[in-house]
């Protein structure tokens, strides 16, 4: 920062104070950015954990529906099961697959949005005069 050539002590003191204030703001800004990054990292890790849990839960549900369908098909081949029941089991299995893919889709969109968040924060903070 430049001070006028013939300035007194007061203007030099104000300039020094302004430089100190700017330094404090830069430190606060850096801390806030670090805190946001840490929070986003924590949320991302939590999202990954939830994705794996959702995948495992949906996998068990699909596996159960598939086994039920196979048993119904075996009974149908033996003549002990009506076609309507087999078709209902197929519809249930298809519904489980749709739910599974919807969960994966929703989690991937949330993951994508989360991956973009730090970039958006960085883009917004680069426009500040303190950077």
Image (cartoon, helix red, strand yellow):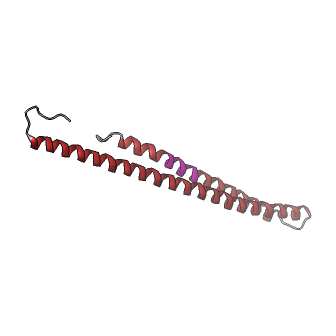
**Image quarter hosting the C terminus:** top left
Left or right, residue 89 beside residue 26: right
Percent across and percent down for residue 130 are 30, 42
- Dominant SS of magenta comes to helix
Please state the horizontal and vertical placement of residue 62, each as a whole percent of the image.
72, 59
- Label total for image: 0
Residue at 23%, 43% (x, y): give it: 19
Q: Residue furthest top?
A: 5
Residue lying at the far bottom in this picture: please name it: 80
Quadrant housing the N terminus: top left
Q: Residue 8, can we see it? A: yes
Between 22 and 63, the residue placed more toward the observer is: 22
Magenta-colored span: 107-115
> Residue 32 colored magenta?
no
Residue closest to the eye, 88 or 38: 38
Task: Name the residue: 45% across, 50% down.
Answer: 37
Residue 92's spot in the image, x, y percent?
A: 72, 61
Q: Nearer the viewer, residue 36 or 58?
A: 36
Q: In which quarter of the image is residue 66?
A: bottom right
Tell me if residue 26 comes above or below residue 61 in the rendering: above
Q: Is residue 17 left or right of residue 26?
A: left
**Residue 88 visible in the current orientation:** no
Q: Residue furthest right?
A: 78
Q: Does the magenta stretch include residue 111?
A: yes
């Amino acid at each position: 920062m430049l001070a006028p050539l013939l300035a007194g002590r007061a203007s030099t003191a104000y300039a020094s104070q302004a430089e100190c204030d700017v330094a404090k703001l830069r430190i606060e800004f850096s801390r806030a950015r670090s805190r946001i990054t840490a929070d986003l990292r924590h949320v991302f890790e939590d999202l990954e954990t939830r994705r794996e849990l959702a995948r495992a839960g949906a996998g068990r549900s699909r596996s159960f529906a598939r086994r039920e369908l196979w048993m119904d098909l075996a009974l149908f081949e033996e003549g002990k099961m009506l076609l309507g029941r087999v078709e209902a089991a197929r519809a249930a299995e298809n519904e489980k697959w749709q739910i599974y893919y919807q969960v994966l889709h929703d989690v991937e969109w949330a993951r994508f949005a989360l991956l973009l968040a730090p970039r958006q924060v960085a883009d917004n903070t680069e426009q500040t005069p303190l950077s």
